[in-house]
Amino acid sequence: MRDSGQAAAPKSDSAFDLEGYLARVRARIDAALGERLPGGAAAVSDPLHLHEAMRQAVLAGGKRLRPCLTVAAAEAVGGTIEHALGAACAVEMIHSYSLVHDDLPAMDDDDLRRGQPTCHKRYGEATAILAGDALLTLAFQVLADEALARPEAQRAFVRAAAELARAAGRAGMVGGQALDMSLKDTEPTFELLESCHLGKTAALFSAATVLGALAGGGDDEQVELLRRFGVDIGLAFQHADDLRDAEFVSHRERALERAVELSRSAARAAQTLGDAAAPLAALAALVERRATEVLDRGAPA
């Protein structure tokens, strides 16, 4: 149960090089994604530029925050990056598919993503829909391949597939997106807004850390601890983004309060795992800074 009041910020290891850590992990994740996506070195038929669209959707930039969380969670329970790369790729494929579909005219109708034309603008709506579908299914193929390649971890990867399906589906990301669409042109209560964030954002953050814990061989207690970390950091991250983007101005005070509370809760959870969880603790501190920096800049006009 979370603290009812806003606790003091947990102590953090200011010497930890989070930027360097994330850069190293991102490079490994990008290489692993490139190997698992179709249309790489092997020349294959690519009707409607489907493979090209899949690669563009995944590899054209991005912070890789969710798969980095998967790797950090695996390391926090004694695993290695090699144990976690397959699960990390599956998480990023789900995230990338969701962005392709979110950008479609029937959803958010966006023309640009990361400064480049969105998938449907570059390849057409049909290819964008199919590319998203293909990324969604490829994520579960990657997890199944991991289970087959690691017989000693088969049960963990079956559980990982179930966790990712729940987080990505009706009870998680898709349900959150449906709620988000229902709130367009309204002024939702803060509680309803946070419920939307819980499904649309925090569910996949939580899946990322749970999959890392499972891939790294964590026990049930560690898995649940990292599930809580993922929910807290995902909600805090989304509240911080709302503050920085000046969304839902009427809820700014509540959003800031929750972002700080949740990021500190996540930091405390990470610190119970010791030095191996230093990247997770540093990420929690970073999210808190992202939220509080808004105060330093002043409220948006």
Image: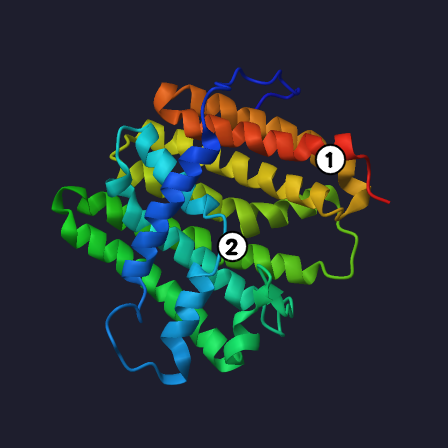
Q: Which residue is mark 1?
A: 294
Q: Which residue is mark 2?
A: 173
The x, y position of residue 288, in whole percent, is 61, 30
- Residue in the picture at 33% in, 46% down: 28
Q: Quadrant of residue 237?
A: top right
Could you classify mark 1 by the number of other residues whose Cα lies within 10 Å: few (under 14), some (14-19), or many (20 or more)?
some
* Secondary structure found at label 1: helix
Can the viewer see residue 209 in this picture? no
- Residue in the picture at 40% in, 66% down: 55
The x, y position of residue 143, in whole percent, is 27, 54
The x, y position of residue 204, in whole percent, is 47, 48
The x, y position of residue 186, in whole percent, is 78, 57
- Residue in the picture at 21% in, 57% down: 145
Q: Quadrant of the C terminus?
A: top right
Name the residue nearer the viewer: 11 or 21: 21
Number of labels in the image equals 2
Name the residue nearer the viewer: 162 or 136: 136
Mark 1 vs 2, N-terminal side: 2
Q: Amino acid at mark 2?
A: Met
Q: Amino acid at mark 1?
A: Val
Name the residue nearer the viewer: 295 or 270: 295
Q: Are marks 1 and 2 in contact (CB under 8 Å)?
A: no
Could you classify mark 2 by the number of other residues whose Cα lies within 10 Å: few (under 14), some (14-19), or many (20 or more)?
many
> Is residue 81 positioned above or below 288 on the image?
below
Q: Is residue 108 left or right of residue 131?
A: right
> Is residue 201 positioned above or below 265 on the image?
below
* Secondary structure found at label 2: helix
Look at discs 1 and 2 and give the one toward the viewer.
Answer: 1
Measure the alpha-carbon separation of dots 1 and 2. 27 Å
> Is residue 282 positioned above or below 179 on the image?
above
- Residue in the picture at 26% in, 78% down: 44
